[in-house]
Amino acid sequence: GAGVSQTPSNKVTEKGKYVELRCDPISGHTALYWYRQSLGQGPEFLIYFQGTGAADDSGLPNDRFFAVRPEGSVSTLKIQRTERGDSAVYLCASSALAGPSTDTQYFGPGTRLTVL
Amino acid sequence: AQKVTQAQTEISVVEKEDVTLDCVYETRDTTYYLFWYKQPPSGELVFLIRRNSFDEQNEISGRYSWNFQKSTSSFNFTITASQVVDSAVYFCALRGPNSGYSTLTFGKGTMLLVSP
């Protein structure tokens, strides 16, 4: 596709449930990023993939959060035992190269997660 | 640590007015990159500009212009002759080697409302 796509656009779940959020990056982009945006705040970094491997997962808030990118393209962010505080918009971005001078991150429309 | 401050939470202008969005950053890096993104009501972050720390030339793109001043750690964004379609939240962001060049540190954003 032309841009980064994310599914679902909205997800409502109950506290304690498991959710998966999907990101489909721009074709050919090797780097993929997940951010979380709470209401009235800027996006906050969660995890970054270079190819299939997680190059930096320092932003994941705890071990309930996990992400994979098994074939180096589509990525899934997984949240176990969801809590109300996990409610936010989860943004995915991709870039052609994860280098300091060449890459710009292009963002998808986000998935709005609501935990009741 | 890196930090981006956008002191203006919300700005309201009337169409055709000029408006400047302020961005002040903190970093210990000598090489870093600064960005502006636009987030319209649809939610998708739209890339506007990237500057590196060695290039202090101001840039103009149509009605948009950017003023980068390293001496004051500021990277301000001006919209000339604003239009209703400019209404959005605007984010300033920073990336540098302290973050492995992989992650963006965002400010909290400035909501711009342009009324007809």
Image (tube, coloured by chain):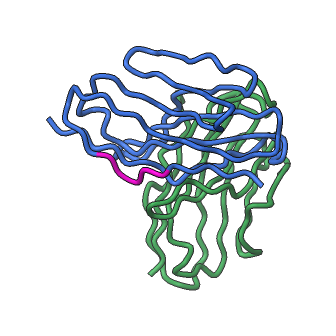
Chain colours: A green, B blue
Q: Is residue A107 above or below residue A35?
A: above
Figure quadrant of residue A66? bottom right
Does residue B21 show up magenta in the picture?
Answer: no
Quarter in which the C terminus of chain B is drawn: top left
Horizontal and vertical percent position of residue B21: 44, 38
Judged left or right of residue A74, residue B84 is left
Judged left or right of residue A110, residue A61 is right
Horizontal and vertical percent position of residue B4: 62, 49
Q: Is residue B9 above or below residue B48?
A: below
**Residue at image point 47% right, 45% down:** A109
Quarter in which the N terminus of chain B is drawn: bottom right
Horizontal and vertical percent position of residue A97: 77, 29
**Residue at image point 61% right, 75% down:** A18
Outermost bottom residue? A16
Dominant SS of magenta comes to loop
Does residue B9 show up magenta in the picture?
Answer: yes
**Range of residues picked out in magenta:** B7-11
Outermost left residue? B116
**Residue at image point 27% right, 32% down:** B85
Horizontal and vertical percent position of residue B110: 42, 48
